[in-house]
């Protein structure tokens, strides 16, 4: 016999919601104090957003995506023809020195601190579900 029906209902409801969440393949939202998120917001959002184009292309899903492949964004010819897929290594080289990695591209910004680059890349990887 179940004596505390409201509590049992809440437990079953919570467990059902958790099962739906786990089954959906969703990932938890990254914390506000996540170093990658903070570095991304500090260094990247002047030109990029996660889900819309700005001066640079949207970056949600960039990890694992072919460079220059968003049809709605006017990439440089060099980037469109690069045949690069954005992996951790490729993003690290890109953020270190975009022009050395893919000459004649349109991005002039660099992230010189290796720990900050790694945090940004980890954040973008997590947002890409990788």
Image: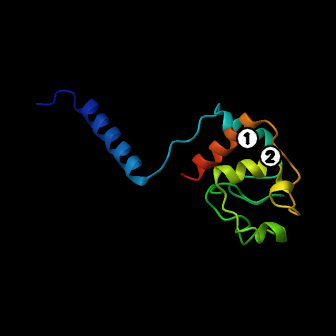
Q: CA distance from mark 2 to mark 1?
A: 8 Å
**Residue 43: image location, x then y, percent:** 80, 41
Residue found farthest to the front: 100
Image coords of residue 100 (percent x, y): 85, 55
State whether residue 94 is above or below residue 53.
above
Residue at the image position 84 percent from the left and 46 percent from the top: 110
Q: Position of residue 6 (x, y in %)?
A: 27, 32
Q: Vertical placement of 45 versus 3: above or below?
A: below
Is residue 124 placed above or below 2 in the rendered structure?
A: below
Pair 2/1: label in front: 2
**SS for tag 2?**
helix
Instruction: Say which quarter of the image contains residue 121.
Output: top right
Given residues 105 and 59, the one toward you in this image is 105
The residue that label 1 is drawn on is: 117
Circle on res. 96: 2
Tags 2 and 1 in contact by the CB under 8 Å rule? yes
Q: Residues within 10 Å of mark 2 (few under 14, many from 20)?
A: some
Between residues 86 and 38, which one lies in front from this camera angle? 86
């Amino acid at each position: 016999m179940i004596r505390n029906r409201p509590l049992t209902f809440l437990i079953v409801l919570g467990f059902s919601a958790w099962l739906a969440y786990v089954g959906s393949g969703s990932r938890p939202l990254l914390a506000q104090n996540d170093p990658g998120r903070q570095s991304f917001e500090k260094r990247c959002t002047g030109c990029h957003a996660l889900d819309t184009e700005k001066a640079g292309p949207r970056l949600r899903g960039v990890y694992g995506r072919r460079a220059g492949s968003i049809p709605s964004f006017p990439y440089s010819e060099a980037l469109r023809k690069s045949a690069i897929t954005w992996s951790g290594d490729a993003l690290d080289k890109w953020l270190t020195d975009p022009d050395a990695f893919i000459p004649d591209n349109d991005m002039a910004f660099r992230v010189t601190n290796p720990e900050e680059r790694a945090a940004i890349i980890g954040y973008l990887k997590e947002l890409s579900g990788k």
